[in-house]
Amino acid sequence: MTATRPSPTTLTGRHVRLEPLEPRHLSDLFAAGGRDEEVWRWQGGPAPRSEKELAAKLRDVLAEAERGELVPFAVVHRAEDRAVGWTCYLDVAVDDERLEIGWTWYGRAYWRTAVNTESKLLLLTHAFEGLGMGRVQWKTDHLNHRSQAAIARLGARREGVLRRHRRRPDGTWRDSVYFSLLADEWPPAKERLSARLGGSRADGRGAGGAAAWHPSEGAGE
């Protein structure tokens, strides 16, 4: 199967709906994660203190999308019908049948809920089964242990570390830890993720373990 470049689309699950990120999501996003330093700790800058500051970050993401550098999604909590974070496809290489998932964050109230598990299930299903990708990757700061644990819980394999890979906003250097999941590893990983979601309550706040995710380089994971 020849891989297809991702384009804006809507992916719907039981707990969340991933829809194209737009300026209209701003107020919901700020309510979910504005002013929370822990949410933005690994996002390449301080927490937005106002909707205006978050709007600047949102504009940056949408500008990258306009240049074809990423495909951003608003993560909409279906029971609450409001956006609680965003996530992206990026670093797409159609000829090499690979892409990256990252630049992801959720409001703290949705950590360790079904929100992250189902979001990744939707993104991975679309990547492997809809777009024909052979590899999906993630990368994260070597100090972001929560993110690394969350990625590993998806069934991804830790590949290695790029040392002194990116400069943080405070001027220090981070190493980037790489993870990947391949197409032939996807069926059992999908089965495990689906089983985890089976134990979650309908409001998305059950046992579908999730965690904070650092953004996947391209704007900021």
Image (cartoon, rainbow, N blue to C red):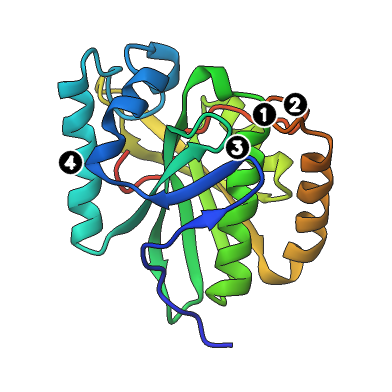
Label 1–label 2 contact, CB within 8 A: yes
In front: label 1 or label 4: 1
User: At label 2, which amino acid type do we have?
Assistant: Gly
Residue to which mark 2 is pinned: 206
Numbered disc 4: secondary structure: helix
Residue 116, disc: 3
Residue to which mark 1 is pinned: 203
- What residue sits 84% from the left and 35% below the top? 199
Q: How far is disc 2 from disc 4 in space, using C-alphas?
A: 33 Å
Dividing the picture into quarters, in which one does residue 188 lie? bottom right
Numbered disc 1: secondary structure: loop
Within 10 angstroms of label 3, few (less than 14), some, or many (20 or more) residues?
Answer: many
Residue to which mark 4 is pinned: 59
**Foreground residue, 195 or 19?**
19
**Label 2 vs 4, first from the N-terminus:** 4
Residue 201 vs residue 139: left or right? Answer: right
Across and down, in percent, residue 128 comes to 61, 69
